[in-house]
């Protein structure tokens, strides 16, 4: 039997409900050896009034979700996952040390019992129950597999095809069978899938989804619909204002230490210092900026630190139509921008060792990372202009490239509340003007950018934050062609070679062999340029003195992977 070993350094891009973690671990443990982790800062220049932290923690969210099923394209957003990691359980979760850990509250065991054929046996905790009293069982596993299998003969409510983020792994399953009253689940694969621990994350309650629908049934926050199998339940919703989570009274595991979590809709970081001062905010976890870090660092009774992450700021191209369908234009842009200068200007003031990210698949800081992007480190405007001329463009008297009388004009989109990305956008706009490309910023609230602009292809270029992980399996869905089942390929990138490499890597038994194949894929991506990684994104974490956190994970749900164990001890 191949019993799952919690100490294996396997990591996953998504998160599960926390199992058993020591409450005594302090927030200092969330740091790594990276140089960008800062010391706690306190000054006496500003005072802060503390709220009753023992009962409620208020988190500043950049937006509130419009779909609460993170396994769908519409629900695959950072805040959705931050909320639902507390509500819907997963078989495994990734901790702050990049280790994949069995959720021992949900599961008694998960074992790889054979490799030919590959067979995994899951033993569900007999006490595991949804908050409406229905048992968590094999029925949930079967439904979640079918919804994400990509099988066109299995349809959602109204006969619609199931929409899922990816079919990777699920499409490789041959059967899912129940035994022992539905508390034993046996999964048999058609062919070997190495990252089987990444599946069933999270589990969507089958008996609810079958009634309301997988695709759109979870487009409203309600304890009657988003029933809980985790430590918290959605208990209150004020549209456009906040979402409140309280303890799940039917949870069979240890009760959440802090009774209430509040996700406050506040996309403006300028508000955070005053909210800390008046006690209406307790926690910030936000992409770093020099101004935000500086302002929060001045607060007393507030701990402020920079936290390294595996998230990457990435420039996406829409290859579907227009000038960016031409590889020469994309290569000219890659040669026209100076990634080293962008990194230095954007984050160099508070992270002086920051460097451009050189891999589309693996983020810097993990063993599998290799830098394949050295050809596009600094600007080479002459080479960029030559490429555009060879593509049939002519430089007009005003310096703008034209083709068939049409100027080369592109839009670029970022989160309009992210001052750092707005600055990067400005730099890119200026750099590309030097090679005759006109760039017009068209920016959106983050929720709109993530939920509709990208998915509907309403962009030319966009800078987005892509979460990273040592496990590449599910992240590479954005480079799979739509015909391979991907709904995350916003760029419209189509490559049979890329599809083949992704398929090959996912079936490798040896992790080192899998990494070699994924790095071959990265080299292909640097040649085809559907996107350009810019730099790793440090985060600012600020919280009232007295809170104890275990630490941040590497995935999009960040620190909320273990929020049921957070504690508060009044500072002396």
Image (cartoon, rainbow, N blue to C red):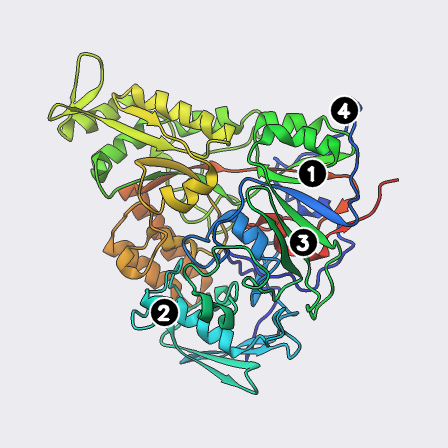
Earlier in the chain: of badge 4 and badge 1, it is 4
- Measure the alpha-carbon separation of dots 4 and 1: 16 Å
Q: Looking at the image, is mark 2 or mark 4 nearer the viewer? A: 4
Q: In this rendered view, identify the residue nearer to me: 122 or 384.
A: 122
Instruction: Name the residue at the right extreme.
Output: 572
Q: Looking at the image, is mark 1 or mark 2 nearer the viewer? A: 1
- Measure the alpha-carbon separation of dots 1 and 2: 43 Å
Instruction: Name the residue at the bottom extreme.
Output: 180
Q: Is residue 435 left or right of residue 59?
A: left
Earlier in the chain: of badge 1 and badge 2, it is 2
Q: Residue 46 bears which disc, if any?
A: 4
- Measure the alpha-carbon separation of dots 4 and 3: 28 Å
Q: Position of residue 520 (x, y in %)?
A: 34, 52
Q: Position of residue 225 (x, y in %)?
A: 54, 63
Q: Assess disc 4: are there few (<14), some (14-19) or many (≥20) residues with their C-alpha within 10 Å of its C-alpha.
A: few
Q: Assess disc 2: are there few (<14), some (14-19) or many (≥20) residues with their C-alpha within 10 Å of its C-alpha.
A: some
Residue for badge 2: 171
Q: Position of residue 484 (x, y in %)?
A: 29, 60
Corner quadrant of residue 517: bottom left
Residue in the picture at 37% in, 64% down: 167
Residue in the picture at 31% in, 58% down: 501
Residue for badge 1: 281
- Pointer 4 with pointer 3, Cβ within 8 A: no
Q: Residue 563 bears which disc, if any?
A: 3
Q: Is residue 484 left or right of residue 407?
A: right
Q: Relative to 420, does residue 230 appear above or below in the rendering? A: below
């Amino acid at each position: 039997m191949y019993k799952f070993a919690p100490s294996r350094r396997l990591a996953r891009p998504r998160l599960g409900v926390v199992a058993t973690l020591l409450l005594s671990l302090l927030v200092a443990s969330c740091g790594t050896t990276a140089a960008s982790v800062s010391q706690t800062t306190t000054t006496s220049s500003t005072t802060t009034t503390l709220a009753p932290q023992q009962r409620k923690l208020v988190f500043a969210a950049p937006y509130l979700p419009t779909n609460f099923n993170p396994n769908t394209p519409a629900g695959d957003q950072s805040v959705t996952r931050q909320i639902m990691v507390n509500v819907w359980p997963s078989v495994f979760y990734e901790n702050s040390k990049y280790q994949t850990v069995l959720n021992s509250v949900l599961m008694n065991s998960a074992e790889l019992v054979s490799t030919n054929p590959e067979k995994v046996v899951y033993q569900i905790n007999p006490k595991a129950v949804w908050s409406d009293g229905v048992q968590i069982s094999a029925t949930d596993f079967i439904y979640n597999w079918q919804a994400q299998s990509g099988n066109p003969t299995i349809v959602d409510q109204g006969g619609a095809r199931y929409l899922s983020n990816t079919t990777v792994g699920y499409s490789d399953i041959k059967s899912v069978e129940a035994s022992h009253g539905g508390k034993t689940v046996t999964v048999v694969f058609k062919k070997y899938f190495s990252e089987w621990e990444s599946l069933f994350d999270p589990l969507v309650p089958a008996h609810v989804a079958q009634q309301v629908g997988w695709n759109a049934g979870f487009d409203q926050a309600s304890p009657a619909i988003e029933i809980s199998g985790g430590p918290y339940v959605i208990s209150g919703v004020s549209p456009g204002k906040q979402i409140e989570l309280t303890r799940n009274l039917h949870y069979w595991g240890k009760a959440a230490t802090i009774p209430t979590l509040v996700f406050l809709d506040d996309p403006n970081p300028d508000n955070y210092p005053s909210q800390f001062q008046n006690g209406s905010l307790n926690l910030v976890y936000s992409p770093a900026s020099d101004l935000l870090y500086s302002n929060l660092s001045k607060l007393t009774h507030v701990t402020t630190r920079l936290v390294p992450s595996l998230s990457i700021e990435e420039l996406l191209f829409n290859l579907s139509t227009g000038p960016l369908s031409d590889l020469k234009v994309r290569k000219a842009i890659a040669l026209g921008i100076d990634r080293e200068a962008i990194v230095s200007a954007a984050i160099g003031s508070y992270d002086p060792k920051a460097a451009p990210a050189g891999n589309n698949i693996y983020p810097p800081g993990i063993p599998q990372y290799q830098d394949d992007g050295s050809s596009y480190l600094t600007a080479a405007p002459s080479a960029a202009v030559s490429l555009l001329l060879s593509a049939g463009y002519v430089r007009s008297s005003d310096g703008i490239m034209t083709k068939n009388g049409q100027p080369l004009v592109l839009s670029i989109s970022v989160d309009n509340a992210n001052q750092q990305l707005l600055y990067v956008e400005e730099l890119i706009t200026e750099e590309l003007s030097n090679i005759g490309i006109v760039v017009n910023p068209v920016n959106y609230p983050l929720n709109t950018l993530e939920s509709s602009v990208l998915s509907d292809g309403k962009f030319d270029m966009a800078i987005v934050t892509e979460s990273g992980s040592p496990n590449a399996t599910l992240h590479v869905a954005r480079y799979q062609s739509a015909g391979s089942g991907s709904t995350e390929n916003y760029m419209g990138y189509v490559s049979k070679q890329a599809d083949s490499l992704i398929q090959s890597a996912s079936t490798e038994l040896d992790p080192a062999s899998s990494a070699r194949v994924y790095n071959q894929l990265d080299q292909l991506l640097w040649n085809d340029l559907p996107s350009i990684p810019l730099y790793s994104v440090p985060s600012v974490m600020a919280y009232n003195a007295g809170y104890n956190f275990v630490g941040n994970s590497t995935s999009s749900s960040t620190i909320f992977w273990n929020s049921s164990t957070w504690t508060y001890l009044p500072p002396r």
